[in-house]
Structures are given as C-alpha cells and as structure tokens.
Amino acid sequence: MSNTSEYTSPKVWTWDQESGGKFASINRPIAGPTHNQDLPVGRHPLQLYSLATPNGVKVTVMLEELLALGHSGAEYDAWLIRIHDGDQFGSGFVQANPNSKIPALMDHSGNTPVRVFESGAILQYLAEKFGAFLPAGGAARAECLSWLFWQMGSAPFLGGGFGHFYAYAPAKFEYPINRYAMEVKRQLDVLDRHLADHRFLAGDDYTIADMAVWPWYGTLVKGQLYEAGEFLSVHEYQHVLRWTDEIALRPAVQRGRKVNRTWGEPSSQLHERHEAADFDTKTQDRLDTSAT
C-alpha cells in the first residue's frame, strides 16, 4: 500500500491522459455538453434525472416521504441517468445542471420551469415547496440546516477522498488512504456523539438532514459502501447504527432507495419510476426488462 516515490509537480498542469480508476472515463477538466441529447419529460410537474448513488437516493427518499404524507403534488417521473455512459454530459442535462452531476430536478408546476441542482438544494427546495421535513424557523430550523450543510461539506471527504483512494484509484497508496480514513472516522464520531443524545439529527423529528446524511453514512456503517466496514471498524458507532436501522424501516425510504437503481438484487431495482404502481413486482419486472 505504501509508495516510496515522490511526485514532482510540473510548473503548469496539463491534462494529457485519463486519471485512471473506475471513473476515469467521466472525469475531465472542462465543463459543458459533449453531445446533443434532450431530456425526456413525463406527465408529472416534477421531473427527476438521477441515479441511485447516495446523492440520488436523498431526493427519491424525499419525494416518496412527501407522497406518504399525502402531498399529491410531489408525484414525479424519475429518469435514469447512466453516468458511466456519459448521459450527464448531454445538452439537455447540462441545461438542467451545468455541473453535470446527478441528481437534477426540473419543476414544471409554474408558468416557467424551475431547475434545481445539488442534492442539498433540491431537498431544501422541496421541503419549502411542500412545507414538510424542515422546521419553520428558530433554533430547530437552524439545527436542521446546519446538519444538512454538514453533510454537503463532509461527504466529499468520504466519497471523492476515502472512496476514491480506497476503492477506485488504479493503485493504492498509504498516505491518502490513511488521511481520508482518519477523517471519515472523525466524521462518524461526530455523528455518533450527537446521536447519543438525539433521536434524529435535528432532534425528535425526522427531517431533510436525516435524508441527506443517511444514504452516505447509514450505508457506510452497515458495510454497504466501498466494502470498507471492517477496515473502518464501523461496528464501533452504535448510535449511528441505531439511527440507521430506524430510518431503514421507513416504507418511503425502502421505496426511494430502489428508484434509478441498476445494481444489486433485481428486487432492489426500479430503473425508472413514473407512478406508484411501478413498485409493484410485475410492473418492475417489465421496466427492468425494457431497460436492458
């Protein structure tokens, strides 16, 4: 795992080769579309373009939770964006999200379509639109938003930092793995200490803060992210595990994590979602077959 050679930086960095690793083909130092490709639009006002990575799961869980509360206006079409195929660099997707990352949401409920990108921004937008899962004001709102933005700032160290060097980099080196493993364990300790005294992140109520953090850190402590559970001794974080297990039992969470998922057991996948009936086994089998 160690590396004794040192890298000498050139005076001016240039991009002359792919970076290597699992995601090398989709990483580049420039923005903008690579090809013309319109985004499909379904019959519901809310159109989601995504993939069931942790960031994508945040939004599908939120939408399913809103529907479970009876907000019929939260009905949505979820379209699959295959990032390994470069769908996020199509012209339509870049118009929805100039950063070319999933998820992206288009809201067609008003006279002028509204685009929302960045998963945290989508959660806050939907919470404010429907008046749910975000306290109206005061200390409770501040606490919820603080944990929401904690996740937005912390998860890159887990994903692009630890996840990349531990699981996806073309070669393993001791320094970056140790550096990011230390930071991820510090983050888990932050959560564990807080959840020792709180049922959910913002207090007694389940909020968008939990929806943001759970897909990343919940799957991590269950050993389902980067296959790093043993390496990080995730069993130590008992309060995070308690919180994770409680959220995993919510029916809306169970539905939301299936949407736009293309891996794992067939029963855990729903490539696209256009109506509640799509979760039915027969409909799901039809959708999965047509998407292959």
Image (spheres, rainbow, N blue to C red):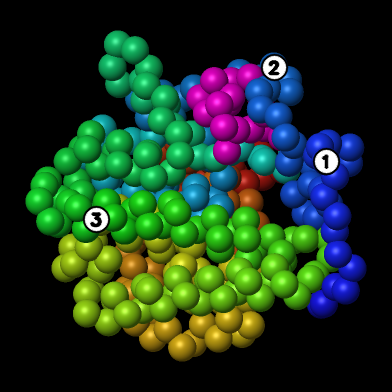
Residue 106 location (% of width, % of height) = 42, 26
Which residue is drawn at the image coordinates 47% and 59% (left, top)?
A: 154
The residue under label 3 is 144
Classed neighbour count for the residue bearing mark 1: other residues with Cα under 10 Å, few (<14), some (14–19), many (≥20) = few
In front: label 1 or label 3 = 1
Q: Is residue 98 one of those drawn in magenta?
A: yes
Give the quadrant of the N terminus.
Answer: bottom right
The three-letter amino acid code for the residue at tag 2 is Asn
- The span from disc 2 to disc 1 (Cα, nearest Å) is 36 Å
Residue at far front of view: 11
Q: Is residue 23 visible?
A: yes
Residue 259 location (% of width, % of height) = 50, 48
Q: At numbered mark 1, what does the secondary structure look like: helix, strand or loop?
A: loop
Q: Is residue 71 left or right of residue 63?
A: left
The residue under label 2 is 36
Q: At numbered mark 3, what does the secondary structure look like: helix, strand or loop?
A: helix
The three-letter amino acid code for the residue at tag 1 is Lys
- The span from disc 3 to disc 2 (Cα, nearest Å) is 39 Å
- The span from disc 1 to disc 3 (Cα, nearest Å) is 44 Å
The three-letter amino acid code for the residue at tag 3 is Cys
Disc 3 or 2, which lies upstream in sequence?
2
The residue under label 1 is 11
Which segment did they paint magenta?
86-101
In front: label 2 or label 1 = 1
